[in-house]
């Protein structure tokens, strides 16, 4: 087995820092299992390889000889054991001098920690070393090892950088949250609204037309999407956690051969599954999870013979929530994680072909459009695109253009003596969201504060109705005393 340079560096770094209980953080599709296989081959002690899904057990078993600890499988005394956490958490733990935890961002749940804390020497593997709830992995691991990035692997040809088409972020104000992400029944009601979702099949015909994986909200949603493809004569299939293993394998085989062009799933192929033949990802559900967003798009980024590119059709607006897969991320074992820099919209859309590109791009790599055009021309194109059909994948103005627009609105409010709320509402009319530029709002010159009281329970807040500036809070009791 020939290792890539970054994989060799990863093995050296992991062995060097093994006492620190390191996590190997490498992008989806970079070959973390290959690194683990080589570590296992070099190990002088029994090894336990821990995974969280049946598919990953069999995937790992195809890479190296090992016993399997999983319901329905006869155990053996092999020096290397691959274990399903669901099974191992209820059984006697096997001896091991090294524990390797696959997809270790799951590892802070009680069932994982009870197992992991029995093994002092451990290595974690993940592309996304963080959790939706912001809880860090520092209680189980002591160091993050990174030897490459998504951008580097795309430049070197090991991964395929996807082209992204997206949709205005649907309003989720009426969607409840549970465990840090959206409640599925509420999402179903939201995303089944055509004006928010857009026409998946027509967009696929326009932009995709190649082997595709769809990420749906739930089983019913997934089956409905597949039915629409089938009505158009497009070979498409659905799979979920209840689909028998043999049938899942057969579906993937038909995708590999090109017999099936579209597969839709719910919670089945979001992570840890190697499907290099896939070229298009359809995101049909919103998520607040950066981890899930990156993992899903990673399914189509593996390089494969004859693969010309990768495409993301984001009908949920997740790309505007989380950014692109090549954005840099500052990893930490502490709670919370954030991308490098504080700009949540570090990308923009091409005015001509609507491809999502980094914000500092000068020439669109898709169609050759030059971004440094006069402002008047940009305004004219914006007016044209706001009239596009409801539910279409449309362009979004870059963050720079949003900032400049809001600066002009604030300046006009100053000149005309308007309230700051006038500028905020004009901005929302143009862009569909409220401005979040505190530094620009600081430039507003309130001609004369007009304070008014607002009551929040027992608390009374006094704010200027023109600019929103607050006076120190007071209570009804304090005012009565005065």
Image: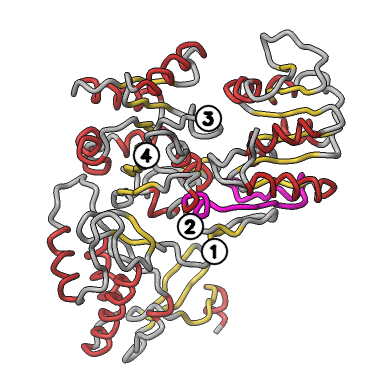
Q: Residue at x 28, y 64 (%)?
A: 397
What separation in Å lies between label 4 and label 1 (alpha carbons)?
Answer: 24 Å
Q: Secondary structure at mark 4?
A: strand
380 part of magenta stretch? no
Q: Which residue is mark 4?
A: 283
Q: Residue at x 31, y 38 (%)?
A: 191
Do callouts 4 and 1 mark residues in contact (Cβ within 8 Å)?
no
Return the disc, 2 or 3, that comes first in the chain's sequence.
3
What separation in Å lies between label 2 and label 3 (alpha carbons)?
Answer: 23 Å
Q: Residue at x 41, y 63 (%)?
A: 346
Q: Which residue is mark 1?
A: 340
Which quadrant of the figure contains the N terminus? Answer: top right
| 158 or 396: nearer the viewer | 158
Return the disc, 4 or 3, that comes first in the chain's sequence.
3
Depth check, mark 4 against mark 3: the one in front is 3
Q: Which residue is mark 3?
A: 273
Residue 115, horizontal then vertical, whole percent: 78, 31
What separation in Å lies between label 4 and label 3 (alpha carbons)?
Answer: 17 Å
Residue 475 as seen in the image, left or right of residue 430: right
Span colored in magenta: 131-154
Q: Secondary structure at mark 1?
A: loop
Q: Say if 55 sits above or below 148 in the image.
A: above
Do callouts 4 and 3 mark residues in contact (Cβ within 8 Å)?
no
Q: Main secondary structure of the magenta part?
A: loop
What separation in Å lies between label 2 and label 1 (alpha carbons)?
Answer: 8 Å
The image quadrant of residue 313 is top left
Q: Say if 285 sits above or below 387 in the image.
A: above
Do callouts 2 and 4 mark residues in contact (Cβ within 8 Å)?
no
Depth check, mark 2 against mark 4: the one in front is 2
Q: Which residue is mark 2?
A: 327
What separation in Å lies between label 2 and label 4 (alpha carbons)?
Answer: 18 Å
């Amino acid at each position: 087995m020939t290792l890539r340079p970054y994989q060799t560096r990863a093995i050296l770094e992991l062995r060097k820092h093994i006492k620190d209980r390191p996590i190997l953080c490498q992008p989806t599709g970079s070959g973390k299992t290959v690194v683990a296989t080589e570590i296992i081959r070099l190990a002088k002690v029994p090894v336990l390889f821990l995974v969280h899904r049946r598919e990953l057990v069999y995937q790992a078993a195809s890479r190296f000889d090992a016993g399997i600890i999983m319901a329905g499988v006869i155990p053996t005394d092999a020096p290397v054991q691959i274990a399903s956490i669901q099974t191992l958490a209820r059984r006697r733990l096997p001896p091991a001098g090294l524990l390797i935890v696959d997809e270790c961002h799951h590892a802070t749940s009680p069932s994982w920690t009870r197992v992991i804390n029995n093994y002092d020497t451990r290595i974690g593997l993940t592309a996304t070393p963080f959790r939706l709830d912001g809880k860090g992995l520092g209680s189980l691991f002591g160091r993050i090892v990174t030897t490459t990035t998504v951008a580097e692997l795309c430049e070197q040809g090991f991964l395929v950088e996807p082209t992204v088409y997206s949709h205005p972020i649907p309003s989720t104000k009426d969607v409840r949250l549970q465990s840090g992400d959206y409640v599925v029944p509420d999402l179903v009601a939201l995303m089944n609204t055509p004006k928010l979702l857009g026409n998946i099949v027509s967009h696929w015909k326009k932009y995709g037309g190649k082997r595709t994986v769809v990420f749906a909200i739930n089983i019913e949603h997934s089956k409905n999407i597949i039915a629409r493809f089938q009505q158009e004569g497009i070979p498409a299939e659905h799979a979920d956690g209840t689909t028998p293993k043999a049938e899942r394998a057969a579906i993937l085989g038909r995708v590999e051969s090109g017999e099936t062009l579209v597969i839709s799933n719910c919670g089945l192929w979001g992570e840890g599954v190697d499907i290099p033949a896939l070229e298009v990802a359809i995101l049909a559900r919103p998520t607040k999870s950066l981890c899930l967003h990156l993992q899903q798009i990673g399914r189509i980024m593996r390089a494969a013979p004859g693969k010309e590119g990768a495409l993301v059709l984001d009908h949920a607006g997740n790309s505007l929530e989380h950014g692109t897969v090549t954005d840099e991320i500052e990893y930490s074992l502490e709670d919370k994680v954030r991308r490098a820099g504080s700009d949540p919209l570090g990308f923009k859309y091409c005015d001509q072909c609507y491809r999502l590109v980094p914000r500092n791009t000068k020439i669109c790599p898709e169609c050759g459009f030059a971004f440094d055009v006069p402002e008047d021309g940009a305004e004219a194109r914006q007016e044209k695109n706001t009239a596009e059909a409801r539910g279409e994948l449309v362009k979004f103005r870059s963050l720079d253009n949003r900032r400049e627009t809001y600066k002009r609105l604030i300046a006009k409010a100053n000149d005309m003596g308007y309230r700051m709320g006038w500028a905020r509402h004009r901005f929302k009319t143009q862009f569909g969201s409220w401005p979040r530029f505190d530094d620009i709002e600081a430039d507003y010159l309130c001609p004369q504060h007009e304070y008014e009281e607002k009551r929040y329970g027992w608390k009374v807040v006094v704010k200027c109705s023109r600019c929103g500036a607050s006076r120190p809070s007071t209570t009804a009791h304090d005012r009565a005393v005065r």
